[in-house]
Amino acid sequence: MTAAVVLRESKPAPGLRRLRRWRDMGGVAALISRSFPRGVDRGGRRMLAEMSALGRAGILGWLVAPLVVPSTAYSEGFVWEEAGSIIGNASLTEVEGCPGRFVLANVAVDPDYRRRGIGRALVEASMDLARKRGATLLLLQVEPDNRPAVHLYEAQGFQTLTKRTLWAFHPLPTASAPGWALETRPRLPTEWNEHWALAQRLHPEGLVWPHPLHPSIFRGAGGLGPFGVGGTAHWVWPAEGRPRGWVTARRTGERGGWRLVLLLEPEAHGRAERPLLRRALAELERRARRVVVELPAGVADSELTGQGFVAERTLAWMARDWRAAPHP
């Protein structure tokens, strides 16, 4: 009997219970820290540190947590508890502004308790809760070479949408010649429809996790302003004729953080990456503390490396789509 059925009958599986939103904070942070040997990303590390500190603060931490830790960190979910310790977790969050679109995150089981069906029970319970909350699409990210996790999700009807690598810029000792000055130009306001159409054709699954693809990323001229004012700017390649490559710079939530969105027509690969990246990096040079770009895994690796980007992680985006026909 699956966890979902058990929940509907109000007889929870041994050890499985609903996440107590703030009181479980310290235990969940400790579990995630020891369950992911490769670590978590920068934002995740900061959040785990805050959660751990607030968890140690006891009741005061529970009271302060809603003011410090984003509400999306633990909206809902489940934990598995053994002998008073949290040894399994799955968090469920609805994507802000996207009714019916949910994210399953922080699915973790203590290494000493794996291969006992705990992970499956947590995932099934979370899926059941998502459906009760009106979910039509449930998304998650997983390392592609984590085969046990991928097999678990596939068994629950999840399908891989894409695999994407996040690259972070690290300045090279010697700057390359600024060829972008002649090869690229700012995008014209009238060209945004073509930009948007290319994004729809290449990446219908979306570009910025976990949000759906939306024209607001591309609409309007954008601009950085003389003092870093403005949160979006677009440039195109080539400078003459119809654009074949596009790069957008967008602010992130991190202080001094910027994300580049690179889109290329097939015939532009191998030619447009360098001038577009150099243009964006040069424009952001005095504004950015951290610049990242995320592309499909294996795309433009040599071009990115040559411009000083270092691969930080590769994740598969998976989805359980209840809008589609049921799986056999």
Image (tube, helix red, strand yellow):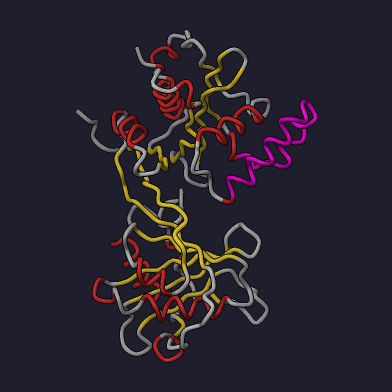
In the image, residue 84 above or below residue 328: above
Q: Nearer the viewer, residue 265 or 298?
A: 298
Check if residue 61 falls in the magenta segment.
Answer: yes
Residue in the image at 67% along x and 37% along y: 51
Residue 313: image x %, image y %?
44, 52
Q: Quadrant of residue 114?
A: top left
On the picture, is 142 further left or further right than 30? Answer: left
Vertical placement of residue 258 versus 125, above or below: below
The answer, for residue 322, to whether it is visible in the render is no
Name the residue rendered at 51%, 67% in the picture: 169
| In the depicted structure, whether residue 222 falls above or below residue 208 | below
In the image, residue 41 sits, relative to residue 60, either above or below, namely below
**Residue 207 visible in the picture:** yes
Quarter holding the C terminus is top left
Q: What is the quadrant of the N terminus in the image?
A: top left
Q: Residue at x 24, y 31 (%)?
A: 326
Q: Position of residue 29 (x, y in %)?
A: 61, 33
**Range of magenta residues:** 43-71
Q: Nearer the viewer, residue 85 or 7?
A: 85
The picture places residue 325, in percent across and down from the top left corner, at 23, 35
The furthest residue to the right = 60
List x then y, in percent, for residue 101.
44, 41
Residue drawn at the location 46% of the way across and 79% of the way down: 278
Residue 119 part of the magenta-drawn span? no
